[in-house]
Image: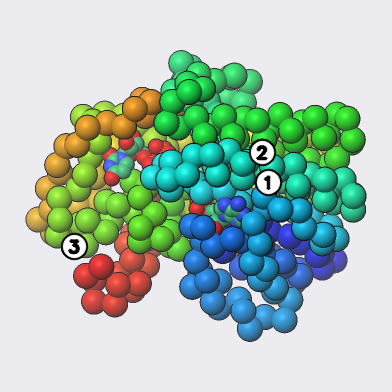
Amino acid sequence: MKPKKILVTGGSGFLGSHLCRLLLNEGHKVYCIDNLYTGRKENIIDLNGNERFTFILHDVEKPIDIEADEIYHLACPASPPHYQLDPIKTLITNFIGSLNLLELAKRYNSKILFASTSEVYGDPLIHPQKESYNGNVNSIGPRACYDEGKRCAESLFFEYYRQHQVNIRVIRIFNTYGPGMALNDGRVVSNFIIQALNGADLTVYGDGNQTRSFCFVDDLISGMVSMMNYKGDFTGPMNIGNPAEVTVLELAEKVIDLIGNSSKVTFLPIPQDDPIRRKPDISLAKDKLGWLPAVTLDEGLKKTIEHFKKTSGNGTI
Ligand code: NAD
Ligand code: UDP
């Protein structure tokens, strides 16, 4: 494959750092743009010596001028406690940030992929969720800054495609986990693993009967890159996720079992607008890209647990 010049926004975050690593391994030149809001330099420390890698400390709220063949636009905090810390900033990142990147793509005729989310389906009334489902989002609730921010960014992407013929790709990512998640990320998989490694009780919100479908990071990144590389005129939106659905309580029990200690579960109030069920229909990704996730939840959790043990040095985080 001919080496390309690729820009990754949010490149020092959880998913972005895995993506930069894979693109470098494929021989490309990678520009990683990040304001380090939730991203960390440690995530990309191994990439800094690579002469094809450039880190640029930059907020996507401001325009940037880099000519690239491809742009992966991931910049946005993804964990509820992080995106709710400054909700107006989350909205600005999604709208103005996407506008700036789309203008850049238009100027240099770059192909641009947007990391949208299963949150565009809100608290879904159909199950599993297909791309044709328009969703059930509370536009004024505490998750709206993220959900509506992403929905609005999707609209922008499709208007740049229709009005300016920008070559867009939109994927809707379902809950993804794996090595590289920050210790303070706040999402359920990292919370449970850290709590269990510390021998603390696992904090289950609500009765734990709400479901999610967890995708291992390597599977997600391979789906994302396949979508970017898809040759035909296909914009998406396309679900990328693992349809193996579990309840949050089942996840807690699995983590305790795999770590093998005496942690118990403690129940805390469920956050407002927390979706009750979530599972992707991935038939589109299967048909168009021939993509399917390969890593089971057990395998992925084991790898993630090993990573957190190493990060903490002695198992105590
Ligand atoms: P993350 O918080 O680890 O990474 C986000 C990155 O974006 C961080 O490095 C952060 O510093 C950077 N960033 C945030 N605002 C920025 C701004 N204004 N300017 C420049 N950089 C900025 O989250 P993640 O899990 O890696 O998610 C990456 C993308 O994928 C996000 O857009 C998220 O919405 C999307 N996504 C992730 C998941 C998931 O389960 N991980 C699910 C759905 C969608
Ligand atoms: N959750 C939980 N305990 C935690 C963190 C999250 O029970 O310590 C629940 C949360 O209420 C939600 C599910 O786990 O039902 C997934 O939460 P996460 O924040 O990981 O992702 P999202 O809600 O955005 O899917």
Q: Up-down: is 307 above or below 140?
A: below
Element carrying mark 1: helix
3D distance between C-alphas at marks 1 and 2 = 5 Å
Distance (Cα) linking label 3 and label 2: 39 Å
Q: Residue 212 at x, y = what percent?
A: 39, 35
The answer for how far apart the CA atoms under marks 1 and 3 are is 38 Å
Q: Residue 4, percent across and down?
A: 82, 64
Q: Which residue is mark 3?
A: 198
- Sequence-wise, the earlier of marks 1 and 3 is 1
Instruction: Specify whether tag 1 is near ligand 1 (CB below 8 Å).
Output: yes
Pair 1/3: label in front: 1
Q: Circle 1 is placed at which residue position?
A: 97
Q: Quadrant of ligand 2?
A: top left
Whether 3 is drawn above or below 89: the answer is below
Q: Residue at x 42, y 31 (%)?
A: 142
Using a 10 Å C-alpha cutoff, classify the residue at mark 2 as few (fewer than 14 neighbours), some (14 to 19) or many (20 or more): many
Residue 58 rendering spot, x and y as whole percentages: 66, 62
Q: Report the residue at 22% width, 32% height from top.
A: 269
Quarter holding the C terminus?
A: bottom left
Upstream in sequence: badge 3 or badge 2: 2
> What residue do we see at 89% from left, 35% from top?
164
Left or right: where does residue 109 sit relative to residue 251? right
Residue 95 lies, in percent from the top left, at 66, 38
Task: Kindly identify which residue carries mark 2.
Answer: 95
